Image (tube, grey):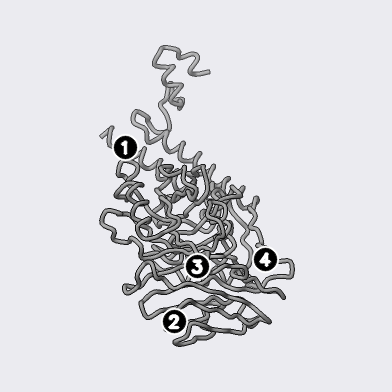
Amino acid sequence: MKTLRITLIIASSWLLWLTLSQFFFCSRFAFNTPAPFEGPAIYNPYDSINPQQWMKCNFHAHAHCWNGITNGHGTAEDIHRAYDSLGYNVHTVSNYHYIDTTFSANDNYISAYEHGYNLRKTHQLVLGSENIRWLDYLLPQTMHNKQHVLNSLYHEPNTVVILNHPALRNGYTSEDLSVLTNYDCMEVLNPAKTSETQWDAALSAGKKVFIVGNDDLHNVIEKDRLGVICTFVNVGKMGKTQVLDALKNGQSYGVRLGPGQHFDSIPFLKYLTVSHDTIRLQMSEKAEEITFTGQEGRVLGSFKNSSEAAYKLNVHDHYARATVRFASGTTILLNPVFFTPEKGYQETPVYEDWNETLLYRSIGIGITLLWFLVLGRLLPGNRGWGGSVGGKVLLPWQRQLARRGLKRLAKS
């Protein structure tokens, strides 16, 4: 019974600490009211692309790691060989909280790791960092928890932070994405879940968030997800800095390959221009349908059986992004064109609410102190809140002195 009691006390203390650290000791933030893209200027991420410089990439793949504790099968070498065979220009190994450096000597090497070990799979992909951040919250996270984690990841200027599979287990809700900041891209295309609704929620709130599509490969041996989703980036020179800059600036798009699409003949974007508020785009092949989507995910226009499309952007649209579907089953999602102030896009920062943080932490400290008082009663060998000598209630350390015969000192 004594062992069981101690085990239950330890387990209860651990659960209490998880709860306190996540919901009381975590920083609290004053989130801004969501506001759509507005302004006299228009940002076009594709205004300077070269159609001959599209590079095929996958940034999310897992190898065997942590002695098999995490979900990954095959080696880093297996993953690189597999993607090389499919004509990928860039591919990274993104193990959980571990940066694989097997091919760090390569010119196109980009360090990567997947961050997150919580129940809801609120995960992030960090590209370009040499340091692993461990801060996370195990239980289903509040917006404050998520912002705190993103702030900890978004600390290096030459990195890209990506929200992985937001729709999976509601890791990031639309409400979250309307206010969260300090990330660059969203993994809209993932074999486990497509997150277009979440992407539109962020864009409708005026967040400059660009698309990424990844295989999220976990078993390169069985090749169950290999080569089904990818990201194309437009870079003149292959290298870590160029690829990361292209992702941050939106010179990229996501692709989901159809069953009839061969990997070496994927259609590509030839151009997307904006002139007098009119968006014009052309693909390398005729599409079955090109659809423009705007504020709140509203369909703005649709064009059938053409390699070209044009749409006049209205101020009430706030942004417009194109989805291109082909007869092969392949789908391409382009990044948005959106209105900005004359001086360009400026994200409104989210600041910590120090008064609210102090209030919650004070409550947490109070609960912690109360728990220590409870422990004094629960621990084996304690009688009530303590023993007694001559009718006087003693604390545990006083009883120990009393047992040694130092009654005079214990009573003082």
Residue 386 seen in the figure: yes
For discs 1 and 2, the disc positioned in front in the rendered view: 2
Residue 216 found in image quarter: bottom left
For discs 3 and 1, the disc positioned in front in the rendered view: 3
- How far separated are the C-alphas under marks 2 and 3? 16 Å
- The mark that comes first in sequence, 4 or 2, is 2
Q: In the rendered view, would you say 348 is above or below 259?
A: above
Residue 372 drawn at (x, y percent): 46, 36
- The mark that comes first in sequence, 2 or 3, is 3
Q: Give the amino acid at mark 3.
A: Tyr
Residue at the image position 48 percent from the left and 82 percent from the top: 307
Furthest residue in direction front, as rendered = 52
Q: Label 1, on which residue?
A: 7
Q: Mark 4–mark 2 contact, CB under 8 Å?
A: no
Q: Give the amino acid at mark 2.
A: Ala
- How far separated are the C-alphas under marks 3 and 1? 52 Å
Q: Give the amino acid at mark 1.
A: Thr
Q: Give the amino acid at mark 4.
A: Tyr
Give the numbered dot on residue 253. Answer: 3
Q: Label 4, on which residue?
A: 345
Residue 237 drawn at (x, y percent): 55, 56
Foreground of the two, 23 or 227: 227
Q: In the rendered view, would you say 162 is above or below 313?
A: above
Residue 144 found in image quarter: bottom right
Q: In the rendered view, would you say 49 is above or below 394?
A: below
Q: Label 2, on which residue?
A: 287
Report whether 69 appears left or right of 230.
left
- The mark that comes first in sequence, 1 or 4, is 1
